[in-house]
Each structure stands twice: as structure tokens, then as C-alpha cells.
Amino acid sequence: MGEIRLDALTGEVVIVSPTRANRPVSPTLCPFCPPSQEIDPKKQVQIVQNKYPALSKTPDERITKGGKPAYGVSEIVVESLTHDIDLPSMDAKTVSEIIAVSHKRMFELFCDPEISYVHYFRNKPVSGGATITHPHSQIYALPFVPPLLRSEVNGFANGCPICESVNESERVVAKVGDVRVYVPFAPRTPYQMIVAGEHIEAFWHVKKNTLEKIAQAILLSLNALERLFSSRVNYVLCAHNSPKNAHSFHAHFEVIPQFSDKAVVRFSMGLEKTTGTPLLDILPEEMAFSLREALKL
């Protein structure tokens, strides 16, 4: 099992988990396909234990001096029993079920007094970072609030930047009722999109009919990327809910494209990797226009 360390230079928290190096990459027998013993063959969407967790509720106390036990939870959301399907090919009802099942479990984990934040994310299979191609996402219950979420909490201190952005027509990509897909005013990566509906602190409080609109909006954002860049783009989809003890947080999903081919999209990785400051070569308003046009095809 791993441990949690603090970078004394930057103050950032790092999870060190050597056992994860043993996890399989594209195994011959898929652990999420029937007749695997890891899944329930009667459930399309289900939560399963991560066999190579970075965190545990019973962490190893034998840790390096200066480190802390890696308390927390790492779980997998199996999104379908069908192996060769990905999220953009699913319907909104299925995607809303995935979100509902995931956030029900996230709320249960959030109630643990030792947990400060629960994170949900999924990678586009393999090249996006996933080691198993079967459609799945992940849930991490963390004993700390990650730096990006801490920054977002500070961003809501003097109003809601999401509520201010959802009606900026130049950067809105798609609308589903009161749910908007939009490109941020200052995106961290090219073609980053935010999916947000009403101002609510966590998605486990969202009503069923709103959840389906959010699912439709997520599908529109992923379909726009697929149409605009075909298979030349990977992505990470994640949910940002309120950390504990935060106020006025606006829960939202983020779609974060990952480009490896500079012939497709040019942007500076050197500056971002070495300073944390993104440098983009295209206006966010132009990104939104291209994504809107892609959805018209």
C-alpha cells in the first residue's frame, strides 16, 4: 500500500503507491466482462473494488518518516457489461444512470469524517490513460482537498464565475434546457469544456430529470470533440463537487481534451509543465465556434 507525502518546496500533496505498478495493461481476460468474478452479471452499471488501490481505509502504518498513511478509497465504476462501447456511443438514459450510481456511492464516501473530497473521473480508453479498455470510470475518496479544487473554492468567494459564464453566447457550445456546455474564458487546455446546470453544490443533490439533461450535455460535448478531431483526441471527463466546509460551490463537469499530435492542435506544453501556466494559440471564442459547428454536421 502507499503513503501520502507533502512536497516541502511547493506544499503539494503527492500519493505514492508502488503496488499500482503491478496493475495489468490490456489484460487478455477482461476483469469487467462476464463471467469474471469481479462483477455482477445482472447489473449494467456497478461499483467494484479497485484491485490496485492507491488508498485504503486500512492503510499500512509502516511508512517512511515524514509520510502519512494513505487513508481513503479507490473504486471502479463499471459503466456497461458491453466491452466494446464507449461513453459517446451510449444514450442519455444510460449516462444519467452512470452518474446517478457514481454519485450515490460518492455521497456515502463523503460522509466519512476522515474524507475531505471525493473525485470522479474517466479517461478515454488506453491512450487517454486507462489501462483497461472496458468502459469504466473511477472514484477516489481523498483525505485532503486537491489544489485545483482549493483554487476553485477560492474562486467562488466573491460570486459564481460559472453562473456568470453560462450565458456568454460566444463561448457556449450547446444548451440542454438550463444546462450549458461552454468553453471557459481562460481554458487550461485547448477545447476544454465545462458542463453546468443550476447552482448546486454537489451532483448527488440533483433531481433525476436534471441529471438526464446533464447526461445529454456531456454527450454533446464528447460528440463535438469526436466530430471535430475524430480519433486524434483523447479526453478526461471529471466531476467537481463541493469539498467539505466550502461555501457557494457550483458543481460542474469538465471535459479536458488531451492532444499529443501538434499537427492537430498546437500549444505549449513546456511552459505548462515547468510553471503550471498554460499557453494557448487559439481564442476560446474560436474554440467554441468550431465545436458548435461540429455539432451541426
Image: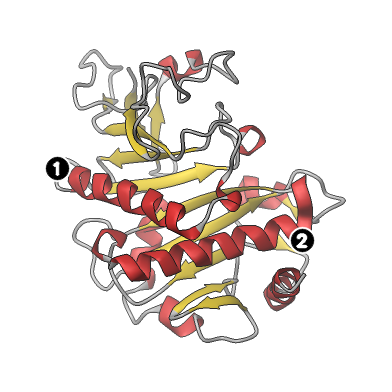
Residue located 52% across and 56% down the image = 91
Residue 219 position by quadrant: bottom right
Report whether 294 appears left or right of 239: right
Say if 33 sits above or below 138 in the image.
Answer: above
How many numbered marks appear? Answer: 2
Toward the front, the furthest residue is 42
Near-viewer residue (104 or 249): 104
Q: What residue type is labelled 1?
A: Asp
Where does the image place residue 237, in percent across and percent down from the top left? 52, 51
Residue 225 visible from this viewpoint: yes
Query: Gap between marks 1 and 2, in whole Å?
Result: 42 Å
- Any mark on residue 259, and which? none
Q: Mark 1 points at which residue?
A: 112
Where is residue 144, by image quadrant? top left
Is label 1 in a helix, a strand or a loop? Answer: loop
The C terminus is located in which quarter? Answer: bottom right
Q: Position of residue 129 (x, y in %)?
A: 59, 35
Locate residue 182, reporting x and y percent: 57, 73
**SS class, disc 2:** helix
Q: Is residue 178 left or right of residue 75?
A: right
The amino acid on which the numbered mark 2 sits, given as a three-letter code, is: Leu
> Which residue is depicted at the point 60% across and 66% down?
187
Residue situated in front as seen by the camera: 53 or 213: 213
- Residue linked to disc 2: 228
Give the image location of residue 5, x and y in percent.
35, 30
Q: Nearer the viewer, mark 1 or mark 2?
A: 2
Q: Could you classify mark 2 by the number of other residues whose Cα lies within 10 Å: few (under 14), some (14-19), or many (20 or more)?
A: some
Which of the 4 image quarters holds residue 76? top left
Q: Quadrant of the N terminus?
A: top left
Crowding at label 1, few (<14), some or many (≥20) Cα neighbours within 10 Å? few
Is residue 189 shown to the viewer in this render?
A: no
